[in-house]
Amino acid sequence: MSAATQLENAWQPLCSAADLVPNSGVVALLGDQQVALFYLPESEQQLFAIGNRDPKSGANVIGRGIIGHLQGEMVIASPLYKQHFRLSDGACLEYPEQQLPVWAVRLNGEHVEVRV
């Protein structure tokens, strides 16, 4: 198997493109982990995949957070404690010790896929 084929095989379907809600979050399961997907059709990078579990509270709520811009970055604000996570890398702006996992994500036809 070539390296290109192996890389292509690393993409896993997560949900349908029709499941996405513009400028809002939806949550899908990747194995036993919840992934919050944010579809931002007006931004340069239109799709983000980030962990749904808030590290401060332990609740799966990130997909219900508020999307915004802070310090020049696209962020999601946790709905419980209002800490902000960069959508690009999952880093928390207020608490550097907090981090959310992120996945490379793409639209492939009618499917949303993440790299695993």
Image: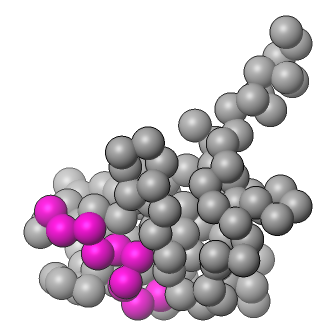
In the rendered view, tell whether residue 80 sits above or below residue 45: below
Residue 71 visible in this rendered orientation of the protein: no
The x, y position of residue 18, in whole percent, is 72, 77
Q: Quadrant of residue 2?
A: top right
In the rendered image, the residue lying farthest to the left is 57
Whether 30 is among the magenta residues is no
Whether 63 is among the magenta residues is yes
Q: Quadrant of residue 71?
A: bottom left
Task: Give me the residue at 54% from left, 61% from top.
Answer: 49
Q: Which residues are magenta?
A: 58-67
In the rendered view, tell whether residue 86 sits above or below residue 77: above
Q: Nearer the viewer, residue 22 or 101?
A: 22
Task: Give me the residue at 37% from left, 84% from top.
Answer: 64
Location of the C terminus by quadrant is top right
In the rendered view, tell whether residue 4 sits above or below residue 40: above
Q: Is residue 1 left or right of residue 53?
A: right
Task: Give me the residue at 66% from left, 42% from top.
Answer: 12
Task: Give me the residue at 20% from left, 54% from top.
Answer: 97
Q: Quadrant of residue 10?
A: top right
Q: Nearer the viewer, residue 33 or 45?
A: 33
The x, y position of residue 3, in whole percent, is 83, 17
What is the image's colouring?
A: one colour
In the rendered view, tell whether residue 85 sits above or below residue 13: below
Location of the N terminus by quadrant is top right
Residue 64 visible in this rendered orientation of the protein: yes
How many discs mark residues in the rendered view?
0
The x, y position of residue 74, in whole percent, is 53, 79
The x, y position of residue 80, in whole percent, is 18, 84
Q: Is residue 42 left or right of residue 1?
A: left
